[in-house]
Amino acid sequence: MKRYPFLRLYIFAITILASLPFASAQIRRISGIISDEAGGEALPSATVLVVEDGSGTTANLYGHYQITVSASKPVTLVYSYVGYSPYTLELPAGGADTSIHIALKSWELSTVEVSAARERAAIGVVAIPVSRLRAVPVLLGEADLFKALTLLPGISSGVEGSTGLLVRGGSADQNLVLLDGSVVYNTSHLFGFVSVFQPSAIKDIQVIKGGFPARYGGRLSSVVNVTMKDGNTKAHRREATLGLINSSLTLEGPLGKNSSYLLAGRLAHSALLSLATLPAYNNGDYLIFAGMYDFNGKLNFQLRNGGKLFISAYSGDDMWGTKRKETDNRGTTLLGWGNKTASVRYIQNYSPALFGQTMLNFNDFTYWVNIQARSNRDGLLSMRVASRIRELTARQWFSWTASPTHYLHFGMEASTPVFRPNATQVRRDKILVDDFTSPGDTVRAFSGAVFVEDEWTPAANWKIHVGLRAALYRVAAQNYPSLEPRLSVEYKLPDNQRIQAGYSRMTQFVHLLTSGGAGLPNDIWIPATTRIPPQQSDQIHVGWAKDYQGFSLTVEAFAKQLYQQTELTQGASFVLNGNTDWESLVESGGKGRVYGLEWLLNKQEGRWNGWLAYTLSWNNRQFANINQGKPYPFRYDRRHDLSLTALYRVSSRLKLSSNFVYQTGHAITLPGFVQETLWGSFRRVYPTKNNQRMPAYHRLDLSANYEYLTRKKRMALLTFGAYNIYGHPNAFFVDSSGVPVTFDRVTLFRFIPSFSYTVRW
Amino acid sequence: MIAKKLGVNSVLWLVILFVILSGCRSGALEYDLIYEGDRLVLNAYVFNKGVIARLTRSNHPQLPLPASFSLAVPGRVWLCDADGVIIAELEDRGDGDFELDMSLATGTGYILKASSDGFDPVVSDVVAIPEPANPLTVNFRGFDPNNNNTFLVDMAFVDIPNRKDIYFWEGHALKNGRKGDFILGYFFNEIGPQCGFYSLFYPDDCFEGQPFQFDCYIERRNMPPNNDSLRIEFGTVHPDYLKYVKSTELTGDLEQIFSEPRPLLSNVNGGYGIVLTKNVTYYDFKL
């Protein structure tokens, strides 16, 4: 131990914090885990309410809660979670600090129909539970949690085929997507139609859009916290789904006492996509083919010292491409991308006042493009461009109930990302003729951060969340320190109303470059370097929320200023430039300005339920060397974004759901005039960037779920879905060609029927 | 009653909606593009042997080109010094073409001005002719023993050290003293992989200060009696030349997928176009 003074200090600090008494002996501290009675799964974001004074707390991602109550008189605690029957616990006066674990019973499993816990309108946070998100219309026969998130205000996706979430005008890279604490760089499969998160393996998903806690950093626009299921600790369970495009199998069960495992795999049957485009291919058009798989695995161990150890891993890859044949030429373009993550997490309730979590996370993201052209004259010419990120992150976080009014979170983290943004090789007849990759293309960096935040309750109606994050990013002997203050103030009004205002400064040490021509998922992640500084943002938001008889209404206004934004140099492409100096292709130092209003009307109860979400926003960017230095609309500047999601329970077996989406078309660059070139040919000229709009995007999806018991008494679920039921030809990209120029709308998919069969046993 | 339970009304409503909205299917899109009006387009080379310029106008991107497929406009073009003082007026050769035969100095700043009735006048940025290249050695090797349809021609020169150069070459048939078709082909393997993906322009990055050789060929059908002479134009170009070449690209299928449209490089104020410089030497050979 003498050799590890830091470790000694760490243990000493934990001991002190865990044993610190409150100044008042009239207070007792209660902590514990809130879990599902049937499967033993912890319930993140479950709430605990003290009936006597209306105070309360929310469980963390591990279902762990800490609360202080009066020790001098009896108190009543109500534990609740959406979809579960609330549990009421009466504590007599007196008693010391203690741990109380609560198991809630699922509402659907209750023998008596009681009122289930309701969602509370949230400001700055999307907290619709997974069970509800899974019920929205399915795509390709399988529910998709990320797609469902885009139906909420302030969150949208790019074009069909682009990847990731766009939160409050941010770009897809500006979301900190964490899967069990590991960063997931690319969240989409199959043209962006399916997210990488298998619904059957996911327990909880939480999106923070504003008022960011100081524990999170490294991205500008949102934190998307995805938690995998721990696995059933009571019984072995299996779930198999056979869909038109994907099939999946999930296995979970106990591993000894209170420990469990989860294994989930999913595979696409891509041949159908190819078959659908085969007639077009035979007529000289593109043949499209695609494939993907996912694998999730998790082990959850309850240790003898009361701690818990979670080991989880994810692996998923995509490959899609197009093929075209002409008289003398054949061309093939293949794109592939994949994530691999692994995490080891240890949580320990050191005392009723102190909770700690230690995390070690690894992630590996690869993206590649392979272009082949074969002609009778030149033979086979191929180019492969690859981009890769690997990152190891260690975190230590604590949550400490310092006093009845102060709940502190503090911790530190360190990360060692390694980037190789652009490795290009050219081959002729499979023989390497050029390798544009040099050792200098690999960028090794370090980022570290410490944070402290205080959930302060100065009075019954006030909640102030104040925090500070100090981060340091080091690359090639260049240090980028950043100090990020965070503040969120909430005030409870009468009649279940609340108002909240917040400010967040965020810093991001990676950038994503997207070629804007079509929006294919050919995104290149690049690190901040000595020539490309980290991104930063300042966001303020003000919100009002009201809960009323099963309805909740939330209205939020936000404004966000973005600094040090990057873009590909206008017209540049990582794919075809053959340039080893990738930093020269990047325009940095850009500014962004986003502001808007969000409305969410949410009906949570009854046979009919669902939500109506609307976002009105403006989103601009400005770079010195793009668009003559003038501001221009961000590619995904959408003035209006409306979605209506309706769920209808026909009977206990049959449920119908639908959603309608309408979005203003995003910005595109179209020609401004035609002129002769120096060689005498005619050329379309694009004088301003993002000067036009794609056609408005809209579609209606429907789905029906029918549940029944099989002869073997297994629960079966039949799902029929229809994506874009009226077949609107939403533009994937606009193909402008010829002089005079004509415009063609290229549509990926119109009407997609789907069917899936799920059986659980 | 059963129909109500099953929600038939809703289904019917959806069918009607489907029928109405499926009429939206269409591949073509209508855009009303913002057009700033016709402007002068001045494209020109300023080089050591004079000036070649072409004066045209821009066209609305959605309007057809004239039946003649020419956007040429009548007008006048002047060569000026860096201060804008006129040195000479270019000779109007008709159909928008202008020429000036005059020895011009390397390293000196020049400006081109042009005007045409009904248009705002245009003025180029100051441009300068680059330093010349070392002499080119041309070796006629005869017909390829493996392919008697190609006549092999090797070209070689030595790069000038400590100077950033971009070279260009062209090989044309010469008929009655006038430049004819482009007849000198090249082997991609000999040029492309060494110096990027350019066939007729290549920077000295990969052979700085070194000798450089590339192999070309003439197809048999371009040999006598169809042609009697070959003119090889070889020299250096200003770096803007390469930028302009790049900016004219991005029209292929792959580029449409992977890149945003690239703006066309222009150094002409008041209108559009480009004035580029080069330093060229002619090498004439009897075939």
Image (cartoon, rainbow, N blue to C red):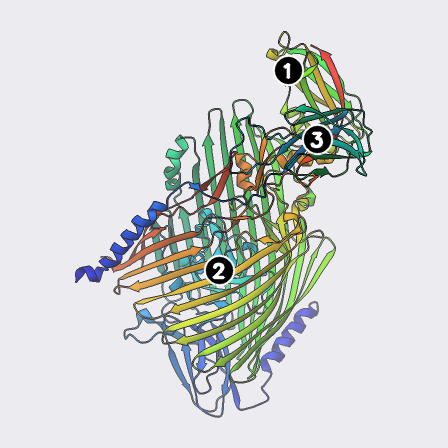
Q: CA distance from mark 1 to mark 3?
A: 39 Å
Residue nearer the viewer, A558 or A362: A558
Determine which residue is flagged by label 1. Answer: B218
| Quadrant of residue A701 within the rendered picture | bottom left
Task: Kindly report which numbered mark, 1 or 3, lies closer to the viewer in this rendering.
Answer: 3
Labels 3 & 2 near each other (Cβ < 8 A): no
Q: Return the x and y of residue B75 as percentages of the image width and height.
A: 67, 31
**Real-space Cα separation, disc 1 to disc 2, in angstroms:** 61 Å
Considering every residue shown, the one lying at the far front of the view is B117
Up the image or down, A373 lies above or below A210; here it is: above
The amino acid type of the residue labelled 2 equals: Ile
The residue labelled by disc 3 is B76
Label 3: few (<14), some (14–19) or many (≥20) C-alpha neighbours in 10 Å: some
The image shows residue A25 at horizontal and vertical percentages of: 55, 91
Q: Of the numbered discs in the image, which one, if any, rests on residue A155? A: 2
Residue with the most extreme top position = B225
Residues at marks 1 and 3, common chain?
yes
Query: Mark 2 falls on what kind of element?
Result: strand
